[in-house]
């Protein structure tokens, strides 16, 4: 029996679009912060008595679609490592946050699953190899293998051998305030949203063309610990990703009225002198980047907005941890 913990991550520079669907190879690099308070714990053991893999999520049998996704993923790992255990796995996973609400639960889930299965199978893999395997489950999961600030290198190889995450050498206790406006499952998953954007958005080429510049400038801001530069580029990058998705055909619109109300609120707070910038992923929730020493007044003004149902204040968190083996 093996038990591992992987933390979720939020991209400051987004991953949006694949160059290879099956291998989940991205069109471009992305950069994230691993979150200390949002994580998945996964316990896995092989069971010769089981006919197929079984996932228990937060104490209950996981829905069929999720079971199938996990089964297909583990079949892939078994095919990659034919000498490892062929037995089905019983998996108990627990998320310390709402599942499927744009809080990147698939990132922490697949990082944890890749680590738990390979560890239980007795494979001695480097973190880089686990990152590559996690990527096959959910692209952004490759970043959750590492702590702090992490860059996913898109790579160039057709087989994905050079597409994995790398931690940045940088310590800066920025804060990320996750504002949950809805914990419901999203209507259009990130996979479909990306595909529609790549295939039909007239703005997708502009997204790709300007992406390298955003990444470069954000990294320079991180290095210089220039909060305004990091925040401004992060917000611009998220708006650009959403603009490109909105004009896909059919349109992909993740924003709810409550998301827009929060965006206006954040911009108004900023005009009053509060340091805060937002980002959003494939869902309606809003994440706010704050400097390390943000005031109680700013935190309250954000978390007590009527659109906010729940909030989590995070700092950079650790990478993958093996809790029991
Ligand atoms: O890893 P996926 O397939 O869930 O895609 C994640 C996409 C975004 O969250 C919107 C961006 C990102 O880089 O995490």
Image (spheres, helix red, strand yellow):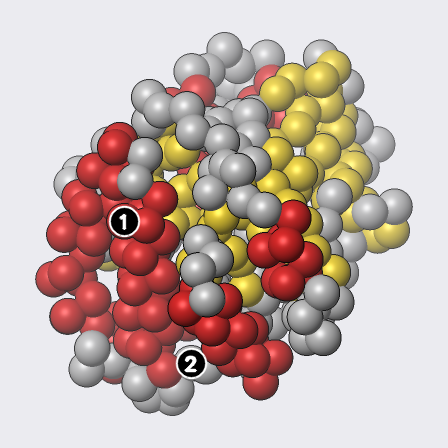
The location of residue 161, given as percent across then percent down, is: 26, 32
Horizontal side, residue 153 vs residue 317: left or right: left
Q: Which of the two marks, 2 or 1, is nearer to us in this view? A: 1
The location of residue 239, given as percent across then percent down, is: 34, 70
Task: Please tell me whether residue 211 is drawn above or below residue 313 in the rendered image.
Answer: below
**Which quadrant would the C terminus be assigned to in this image?**
top right
For label 2, the crowd category at 10 Å Cα-Cα, with few meaning under 14, some 14 to 19 and many 20 or more, is: many
Task: Please tell me whether residue 247 is drawn above or below residue 35 in the rendered image.
Answer: below
The location of residue 302, given as percent across then percent down, is: 62, 62
- First in sequence: mark 2 vs mark 1: 1
Q: CA distance from mark 2 to mark 1?
A: 28 Å
**Which quadrant would the N terminus be assigned to in this image?**
top right
Q: Is residue 315 visible in this depiction of the protein?
A: yes
Residue 68's tag is none
Q: Is residue 99 visible in this depiction of the protein?
A: no
Determine whether the beta carbon of the residue marked 1 sits less than 8 angstroms from the nearest atom of ligand 1. Answer: no
Horizontal side, residue 126 vs residue 177: left or right: left
The location of residue 111, given as percent across then percent down, is: 54, 35
Would you name the residue on which mark 1 appears?
229
Of residues 262 and 119, which is closer to you in this image? 262
Task: Please tell me whether residue 7 is drawn above or below residue 201 in the rendered image.
Answer: above
Residue 252's tag is 2
């Amino acid at each position: 029996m093996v038990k591992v913990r992987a933390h979720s991550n939020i991209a400051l520079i987004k991953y949006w679009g694949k160059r290879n669907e099956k291998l989940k190879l991205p069109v471009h690099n992305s950069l994230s912060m691993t979150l200390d308070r949002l994580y998945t714990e996964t316990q896995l053991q092989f069971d010769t008595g089981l006919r197929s893999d079984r996932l228990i999520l937060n104490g209950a049998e996981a829905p069929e679609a999720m079971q199938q996704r996990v089964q297909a993923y583990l079949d892939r790992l078994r095919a990659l490592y034919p000498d490892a255990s062929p037995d089905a796995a019983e998996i108990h996973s627990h998320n310390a946050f709402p599942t499927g609400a744009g809080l990147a639960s698939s990132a922490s889930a697949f990082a944890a699953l890749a680590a738990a299965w390979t560890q239980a199978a007795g494979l001695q893999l480097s973190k880089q190899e686990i990152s590559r395997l996690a990527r096959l489950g959910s692209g952004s999961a490759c970043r959750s293998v590492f702590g702090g600030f992490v860059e996913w290198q898109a790579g160039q190889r057709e087989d994905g051998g050079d597409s994995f995450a790398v931690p940045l050498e940088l310590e800066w206790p920025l804060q990320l305030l996750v504002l949950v406006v809805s914990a419901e499952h999203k209507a259009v998953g990130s996979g479909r949203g990306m595909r529609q954007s790549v295939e039909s958005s007239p703005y997708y080429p502009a997204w790709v063309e300007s992406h390298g510049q955003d990444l470069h400038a954000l990294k320079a801001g991180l290095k210089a610990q220039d909060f305004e530069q990091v925040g401004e580029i992060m917000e611009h990058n998220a708006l650009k990703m959403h603009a490109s998705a909105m004009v896909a055909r059919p349109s992909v619109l993740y924003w709810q009225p409550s998301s827009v109300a929060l965006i206006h609120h954040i911009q108004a707070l900023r005009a009053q002198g509060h340091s805060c910038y937002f980002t959003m992923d494939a869902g309606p929730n809003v994440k706010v980047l704050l400097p390390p020493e943000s005031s109680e007044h700013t935190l309250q003004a954000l978390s007590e907005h009527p659109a906010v149902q729940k909030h989590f204040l995070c700092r950079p968190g650790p990478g993958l941890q093996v809790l029991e083996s």
